[in-house]
Structures are given as C-alpha cells and as structure tokens.
Amino acid sequence: MTCSWHIITPEYENNTIKYSPDGGTTIFVNGVYSYTDLDDYNHEFMKKKGNVKADGTYDINITFVLPTYKVVTEIENIYQLDFRNTNLVNF
C-alpha cells in the first residue's frame, strides 16, 4: 500500500517562489511533486514568461542527487531565486 499527501500547500507556506530578472512570482499548484516535477513546473512557467535560452535550455535547473540525497539548484547568468518568504523546511 502506498500513501501520499500534498507537499506543496499554502498551509506549509512553500508554494511561492520568486525569480528575477522580472521579479515575478510563481505560485505552485497544491500537489505531490518530485524534484523532477518541480523542475518541469518551473520550466513551464519560465517558458510562458519567455525566459528560455536560444538553445531551448533554462537558466534555473533543479536536480536531485541520489547518492548524497541533496537537491541541487543550478542558476546561470543574471537569474536569482528568492526563498526568503518560503518555508522549505516542510518540504
């Protein structure tokens, strides 16, 4: 038997992430996300905002490194991520 629950919710205060250059706010839809899902969701948002490089890649990438159980966020160029108002402890 498997069990799952929403890991991204307003109650956890972890459904908002800001990135620049436009200072925009991405609001994640409540749900159960893997790190791949988070990366895909972020890329879809960036694509809608026109923040895709000429070669079709992105300046923000989220990956999970299984041997170390760490999440790696790669940020290139002038982009920044703002986690100040996000509670990632509950994630």
Image (tube, rainbow, N blue to C red):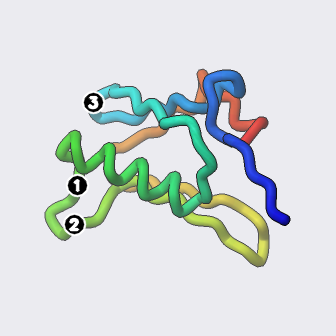
Q: Secondary structure at mark 1?
A: loop
Q: Residues within 10 Å of mark 3 (few under 14, many from 20)?
A: few
Please give the label number shown on residue 56: 2
Residue that protrudes farthest toward the front in the picture: 1
**In front: mark 3 or mark 2?**
2
Comes first in the chain, label 1 or label 3: 3
* Label 3 sits on residue: 22
Please give the label number shown on residue 52: 1
Q: Residues within 10 Å of mark 2 (few under 14, many from 20)?
A: few
Q: Residue at x 55, y 55 (%)?
A: 73
- What amino acid is at disc 2? Gly
- What amino acid is at disc 1? Val
**Whole-Å distance between the Cαs marked 2 and 1?**
6 Å
Q: Secondary structure at mark 3?
A: loop
Note whether 22 is above or below 72 in the view shown: above
Percent x, y for residue 47?
A: 24, 50
Q: Residue at x 41, y 32 (%)?
A: 26
In this orientation, does residue 74 appear?
A: no
